[in-house]
Amino acid sequence: MKWFARVVSLLALSITAFPAEGKDIGAMAKGSKIKINGGTVEIIDSVNPEIIKSKFEKQFTYDKADNPKLKELALKYKLKDVIAGGKTEFDRMVLLSDWVHRQFKKFGQPSKNTVNALEILELVQKGGVFYCAQYSSVFMSSCYSLGWVARDLGLHRLLGNPGSPEHSVPEVWSNQYRKWIIMDPTFNIYIEKNGLPLNGNELRDEYFGNKGEDLTYVQGAEKRKFKKSELPIKYTELAGFSVNAFYIDWYSFLFFMDNSNYMDNPPSFGNKCFMIYDERNSSVKWHKRDVPKDKKEAYWTLGEANMAIVPGAKGKLEVELSTNTPDFGTFLVKEDDKEWKEAGNKFSWALNPGLNKLTVTTRNNTGVKGPENSISIKFEP
């Protein structure tokens, strides 16, 4: 049954690195040198970030693109065509958010208490009215239908500014930026600082730091940019609807749902949910949930292929890959400038005299590739 255990290890969603004997070359800094069997290797360059794990992810339920309802969503609304004009992954995410925003013609008390994207879009076509929660859930399910990972966040204002005290937004994992990013299809915006789109906690820090004065609000597929002083951004298609200067106040509280499979299971708001709560917002009472001791626990990483590398036989290194990739399909490996090849999580890397480069990534079952990590090594026999 050894072959069976081997297959299970290759197909596991989260693959754990073996305990390396000696130094892990994959964790060594640029310029480091180490003797191996048959010569010496020097690290010329390395992009091999550690995978951030979290107990909160273990409580989280991802949806999967093979969900028949997600397949129906993607086909019925031709979502691949919706994003086809994007040059980069993030461009395509912006196009999807813009598309979701434009499906809704009215904003207000929901016509039906549902977060099922198919139901929502069908009701919208019949004149249905919905809140931000439905915008968020349609975007999130649409992401999964295309092989992207997203989650739903609840926000709450600290100051009691005009308008609703609460808001819902999706946060999507960007392989391009290697981070979670807030995409708000309700207002058809994302928010950036110095050209980098931000996640919920980064926006929270900007709010408590200087009320978001350094932020840029980026609207729609055209990516029109506004500074705080240029708000409100008004929406003619939705009377009385705008992004105003109080928007950033919503990020005072971040409440993370514990599931994303809304097609089949609406959010429970149960004890597996968690939130970011500290002295900066403790003056206002809202929900009570588990709070990460380190905010990194709320921002686990996905899609990375981390390399553990140890000396092997003469002129060879032994490589083991680990990942945290929902709906994981396979690892892809490229030596030097050769073509990508599928690989298991363990393999030998035969070195040539001089410069050697190994590039690795993941591919999920929808065909979406993760970030590319690499290590360049100079080998002297």
Image: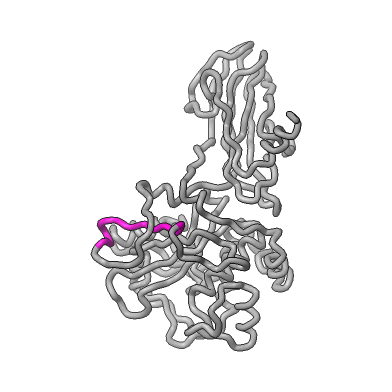
Q: Is residue 81 left or right of residue 110?
A: right
Is residue 294 depicted above or below 155 in this figure? above
In magenta stretch: residue 56: no
- Quarter location, residue 273: bottom left
- The image position of residue 349, as x and y in percent, is 67, 25
Magenta highlight: main SS:
loop
Q: Quadrant of residue 247?
A: bottom left
Percent position of residue 193, x then y: 41, 58
Q: Which residue shows up at 60% across the image and 72% down it?
A: 116
Quadrant of the frame with the C terminus: top right
Q: Pick whichever, 212 or 164, lies toward us.
A: 164
Residue 275 is a magenta residue? yes
Name the foreground residue: 12 vs 191: 12
Residue 190 at least partly seen: no
Q: Does residue 335 appear left or right of residue 114 in this picture? A: right
Q: Is residue 335 positioned above or below 225 on the image? A: above
Q: Residue at x 62, y 24 (%)?
A: 355
283 sits to left or right of 316: left
Tell me the quarter of the picture where residue 67 sits: bottom right
Q: Is residue 287 above or below residue 336?
A: below
The magenta-colored residue range is 272-282
Residue 23 lies, in percent from the top left, at 51, 20
User: In terms of depth relative to the viewer, which is nearer, 176 or 286?
Assistant: 286
Tell me the quadrant of the picture where the N terminus can be found: top right
- Horizontal arrangement in the rendering, residue 83 relative to residue 237 (left or right): right
Asked whether residue 273 appears in the rendered view, the answer is: yes
Viewer-proximal residue among 75 and 240: 75
Furthest-left residue in this view? 283
x and y percentages locating residue 140 in the rendered image: 57, 65
